[in-house]
Image: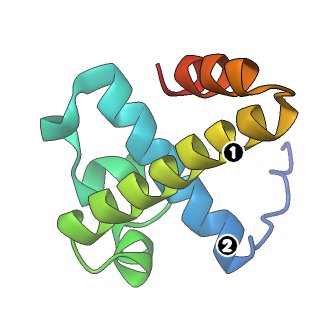
């Protein structure tokens, strides 16, 4: 008999990111209407109850994903702006980052 690998408990922040990553994957692959708490749990290989422990409902889950992705988007723009030297480079960098 082959021993299964030992389970490892993830930190709450890592688990939350895992759930959001799976939600994003479902949206990209199947569309937003395909997102369900059960589907996210199945894709992340966790229980549906655990998804609910982090996000009380689908709306809160999708809102958290939107806030996370918007934060990444803004950070990308800030980095592009910080790396620009001149005003013209700033305009090009931020336009490129946001488009």
Q: Do the residues labelled 2 and 1 touch (CB within 8 Å)?
A: no
Front residue (pair 13, 94) = 94
Q: Residues within 10 Å of mark 2 (few under 14, many from 20)?
A: few
Q: Mark 1 points at which residue?
A: 78
- Residue located at (35% from left, 34% from top): 26
Give coordinates of residue 77: x percent, y percent: 63, 38
Question: Closer to us: mark 2 or mark 1?
Answer: 1
- Residue located at (71% from left, 27% from top): 87
Quarter of the image with the N terminus in it: top right
Front residue (pair 63, 27) = 63
Does residue 23 appear in this view?
yes
User: 64 left or right of 14?
Assistant: left
Give coordinates of residue 3: x percent, y percent: 86, 50
The residue lying furthest to the left in this view is: 33
Give coordinates of residue 42: x percent, y percent: 40, 48
Compared with 77, 7 (above or below) is: below
Q: Quadrant of residue 52?
A: bottom left
Q: Is mark 2 on a helix, strand or loop?
A: helix
Query: Which label belongs to residue 15?
Result: none
Q: How crowded is mark 1: few (under 14 residues within 10 Å), some or many (20 or more)?
A: some
- Residue located at (86% from left, 32% from top): 83
Compared with 19, 24 (above or below) is: above
Query: Which label belongs to residue 13?
Result: 2
User: 56 left or right of 91?
Assistant: left
Give coordinates of residue 98: x percent, y percent: 50, 27
- Alpha carbons under labels 2 and 1: distance apart: 24 Å
Does residue 43 appear in this view?
no
The residue lying furthest to the front in this view is: 87
């Amino acid at each position: 008999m082959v021993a299964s690998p030992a389970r490892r408990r993830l930190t709450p922040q890592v688990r939350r990111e895992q759930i959001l990553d799976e939600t994003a994957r479902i949206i990209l692959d199947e569309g937003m209407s395909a997102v369900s708490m059960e589907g996210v749990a199945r894709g992340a290989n966790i229980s549906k109850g655990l998804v609910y422990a982090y996000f009380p409902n689908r709306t809160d889950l999708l809102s958290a994903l939107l806030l996370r992705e918007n934060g990444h988007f803004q950070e990308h723009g800030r980095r592009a702006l910080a790396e620009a030297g001149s005003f013209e480079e700033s305009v090009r960098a931020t336009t490129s980052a946001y488009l």
